[in-house]
Every structure is written in C-alpha cells, then in structure tokens.
Amino acid sequence: MLSDQALTVKACWGRNGLSRLESGLLLAHVLGKPREWLLAHDDHVLSSAELSAFLALDNRRRQGEPMAYLLGQREFMSHCFTVGPDVLIPRPDTELLVEMALVSIAHKAAPAVLDLGTGSGIIAISIAKARPDAQVTATDCSARALAIARTNAKRLNISVQMLLGKWFDPFPTSPLFDLIVSNPPYIHPQDPHLDQGDLRFEPRVALTDEQDGLSAYQSIIFEAASRLKPGGEIWLEHGFDQAQAVVQYLTQAGFTQIKTSQDLAGHPRVSGGSYNSCNS
Ligand code: GLN
C-alpha cells in the first residue's frame, strides 16, 4: 500500500494493485505528460498535490470506476473524445455502426444525417469528421450528455447541430434525412451485466429501456420511415441476440435491402436498410 510520503514515479507505477498499464495512464494523466515521459523520468518525485491526486484516482480505480471516466477521455475512430458519467463509454463495436453509416452515404453529396441518442456525440462527430460536406444533426434526451457532445464537437472543430429531446421529438415538422443512425439503450433491465464492471458506473438510461431492450427500436424504426428521403438508410447498433427482432421491425416498417453486420467478435451487431417511399 502506498503511503502519503514523497514518492517517485517508479514507486507509484504498477506497485499498488493496479496493472502497470492502468497506473501508468493515471500517473501520466496526473502529471500532464505522455506515458513515454514516465519511462525517462521514473526518478521524478511527485509533489504532494500530484501524489494525493494520483492516490485518489488509484483508489477510485480499485473501487471499479472505469478508466475512461477517471481519465475523462476515450479514443473512438482515432479521435479523442471527452467522456464522463453522464455518457456511455465509447465501445469499439460502435465503430462498425459508423463504418456502415459512412458506406451508406458514400455516393451522396452533402448528405443530411441524424444521430438519435448521441450521448458524447461520437457517432455524429465521427461521421462529420469523415464527411465534412455532411449536415449532421444529433439529438439526446439528456442535457448533460448534450453538453459533453457539444464540448467534443468544439474540441474536434466540427459543426453538428445538437438538439435536446427524445428520439425525433425535437422535429415537430419533418426535415428529411439521407441517413438515420442510433446506438439506443438495448440491454434488458434484468441483464446481470448491468451490475458488473464498467456498466455499473454508466448512465442506466443510456444502457436499458427498462422494458424489454427492444422498445427503442420500435420507436425509432417506425417513425424513421417518415423522416427519410427516398433511398435514405437507417443503421442501428443492437445487442448480439437482437438482430432478428430489429430486422423484423425494419421489414414491417417497409425497409428493403436489409442487412446485418457482425462485430469483431463475430456477433451480429449492426442492422440497417433502405427506405423508398414507393415501397409502402
Ligand atoms: N454495447 C453496450 C454494452 O453491451 C450497450 C450500449 C447500449 O445499450 N447502447 O455494454
């Protein structure tokens, strides 16, 4: 156990129950230096302010708080995003959603894009980064999440219209979109994962619909049909066992060319399709 006395980087690094990687990241964060700096300066003696800041983070990590929240950031699609307990921690799975979304607008000039339940804004902002000509709008029902999304847009020098409200609520009249994307709350409220690991610290409202894990897809998919331009597409992230239900809603709502893509672990993770008003 580290005590509150003068300690060097070497003494703090990986010697307090955390892995060397995690304690190195926390140390570098507290010292405001890149992690490589630690190697070359492992005899640096931490000031008492640095030491108490490090010990506080180290302690919170040992209580299970996610690294992303302690560091206040996480990388997604090669961009660094600000995160905190008001938003989900970006997952690699969601990069698949962004990739499918980008393919869907690859041949459209200046596409109008809508991201529903944007959280920290990673999806909307990554699309806007990759497609500077896109007109990207994002909604979220949490004002605190939107504040983080706005911070991220500013930090990454991107203009995304951010609107407060649940799903399509901020649009009483219909601007039409070329692409609608969402990573809605899809975990079943009784799923034991909600009480494990990082998920214990994430906003519950972003993880579960408190119903059956599928209600957000119903709300989004059936309304999306009237919010898309002819040939517009919708792409949605979902749970590993939800593809069949999501595909069924897409079919019922009149979407065609429906596809499901698998994440890196081989789970069906993202489904979507195209809407032609003449289909229905
Ligand atoms: N993919 C997240 C998880 O399973 C859940 C995110 C969500 O509900 N949208 O941990």
Image: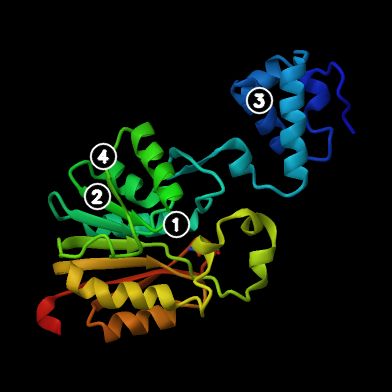
Residue ranking furthest to the left? 278
Q: From the viewer's perspective, is 33 left or right of 165?
A: right
State the separation of the CA atoms marked 4 and 2: 8 Å
User: How far apart are the alpha carbons under marks 1 and 3?
Assistant: 29 Å
Report the disc number at residue 94: 1
Q: Quadrant of residue 79?
A: top left
Q: Residue at x 26, y 39 (%)?
A: 159
- Which element is circle 4 on? loop
User: In the drawing, what numbered circle is on residue 30?
Assistant: 3
> How far apart in space, not on screen, are marks 2 and 1 (Cα)?
17 Å
Residue at 32% across, 57% down: 115
**In x, y percent, where is residue 151?**
40, 37
Mark sitting earlier along the chain (4/3):
3
Marks 1 & 4, CB-CB < 8 Å contact: no
**Residue at 18%, 61% in the rendered image:** 177
* Neighbourhood count class around disc 3 (C-alpha, 10 Å): few under 14, some 14–19, many 20 upward: some
Q: Would residue 57 be seen by someone viewing this image from the given angle? A: yes
User: Cα distance, mark 1 to mark 4?
Assistant: 21 Å
Is label 1 or label 3 in front? 3
As shown in the figure, which amino acid type bears the numbered disc 2? Val
Does residue 20 appear anywhere in the picture? no
The quarter of the picture where the C terminus appears is bottom left
Dot 2 or dot 3: first in sequence order is: 3
Quickly name the residue at label 2: 136
Q: Which of pointers 2 and 1 lies earlier in the amino acid sequence? A: 1
Name above or below for residue 248 compared with residue 13.
below
Compared with 37, 74 (above or below) is below
Residue carrying label 4: 159
Whether label 4 touches label 3, CB < 8 Å:
no
Look at the numbered disc 1 and say if its residue's Cβ is closer than 8 Å to ligand 1: yes
Indicate the amino acid at tag 3.
Val
